[in-house]
Amino acid sequence: MDFTLTTPALLFPAISLLLLAYTNRYLTLAGLIRNLCDRQQNKSDEFILGQIQNLRKRVYLIRNMQLVGVVSFSLCVVTMLLIFLGQVLPGEITFAASLISLLVSLGLSIREISISVGALDIQLDSCQ
């Protein structure tokens, strides 16, 4: 397999879109948290406390997803720099680390999605 500058460059759009999706999730959660905190101050409710606890976990997961995604993106840039400098083997190792970081970020995303299902369960329980 030829390992050229275009190989790590293929990840740039994918990682950029992932970071954008993560940011959108974060902004949505921030709005939900603000609304629930306002509701909690007006009327203490066990349902709202459960939702806030769930959202706290999700916000930290999204932060970690973004952090590992940025590490993956940075490692792609370092990979391209190493290839440009003629350091193919270190570039390949760095690219592998970038792919692993991307997998970790996606794994955290799966975990966040499963927690969001828990939030919907809390919401559905309150509707009964």
Image: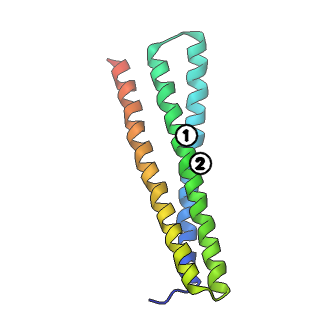
Residue at image point 61% right, 59% down:
70
Residue sticking out furthest to the left: 128
Q: Which mark is residue 94?
A: none
Residue at image point 36% right, 19% down:
127
Residue 31 point in image, percent of width and height: 60, 33
Residue 9 point in image, percent of width and height: 58, 76
- Give the image's coloring scheme: rainbow
Element at label 1: helix
Sooner in the amino-acid sequence: mark 2 or mark 1: 2
Q: CA distance from mark 2 to mark 1?
A: 12 Å
- Comparing 100 with 5, the one in front is 100
Residue 126 point in image, percent of width and height: 37, 19
- Comparing 38 with 105, the one in front is 105
Can you say whether 79 is above or below 18 in the image? below
Q: Quadrant of the C terminus?
A: top left
Looking at the image, residue 113 sits to the left or right of residue 16; the answer is left
Residue on which disc 2 sits: 23
Which label sits in the foreground, 2 or 1? 1
Residue on which disc 1 sits: 60
Residue at image point 40% right, 49% down:
110
Q: Residues within 10 Å of mark 2 (few under 14, many from 20)?
A: some
Q: Is residue 55 visible?
A: yes
- Comparing 21 with 72, the one in front is 72
Residue 64 point in image, percent of width and height: 55, 48
Total numbered badges shown on the rendered structure: 2
Can you say whether 53 is above or below 89 in the image? above
Can you say whether 64 is above or below 76 in the image? above
Q: Amino acid at mark 2?
A: Thr
Q: Residues within 10 Å of mark 1 (few under 14, many from 20)?
A: few
